[in-house]
Image (cartoon, rainbow, N blue to C red):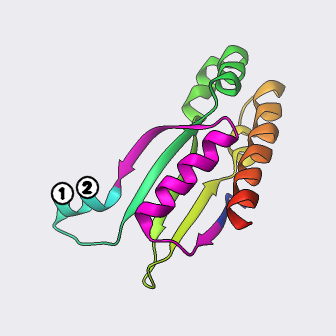
Amino acid sequence: MYEFNLTLELPFEQAVDKVRETLLSEHLGIVSDVDVQAIFKNKMGKEIRPYHIYGACNPKLADRVIASEPNAGVLLPCNFILRETDDGNTVLSFMDPVPVLGLTATDEPKAVAAEARVMLQKVIAKLSA
């Protein structure tokens, strides 16, 4: 599987704040934010519910990947989405780093992927509690 997810019974903006706070508790920060809703509206005139693609990163883990296989940076950061559902809840979906970093030729990125997966699963568990 390429992702794992959770539906939060929170409006979008509250979910963003909660996810950001929980990521920080696991030493992950948001390093990028693509506002798909705004892009669709500006480029195509299409209205969709809030939908963002974020990049989460732990610099120490990223350093290990890049140090062992510099071009593997193309597989970073750990992407996730937050999207609003028709009923006003918010879906959080994390890209599973194991299959993504499994594309690399060296062992260190694969080890980092396993560690990152554990961190992301802890985020899911904390948000589920």
Q: Residue at x 67, y 42 (%)?
A: 25
In this view of the protein, which residue sits in the foreground, 127 or 59? 127
Residue ID at (62%, 18%): 70
Q: Which residue is mark 1?
A: 43
Q: Which residue is mark 2?
A: 39
* Circle 2/circle 1 CB separation < 8 Å: yes
The magenta stretch spans which residues? 6-35
Q: Amino acid at mark 1?
A: Lys
Give the secondary structure at mark 1. helix
Amino acid of disc 2: Ile
Q: Which class describes the residues within 10 Å of circle 2: few (<14), some (14-19), or many (20+)?
A: few
Residue 106 visible to an observer of this rendering: no
Relative side of 15 to 95, left or right: left
Residue 98, x across and y down, in percent = 76, 45
User: Distance of mark 2 from mark 1, alpha carbons?
Assistant: 6 Å
SS class, disc 2: helix
Measuring from the top left, give residue 96's x and y in whole percent. 69, 51
Residue 52 image offset from top left, x and y in percent: 41, 56
**Is residue 66 depicted above or below 122 in this figure?**
above
Direction top: furthest residue: 67
Residue 12 visible here: yes
Q: Residue 105 or 38: which is nearer the viewer?
A: 38
Vertical side of 27 occupied by 1: above or below: below
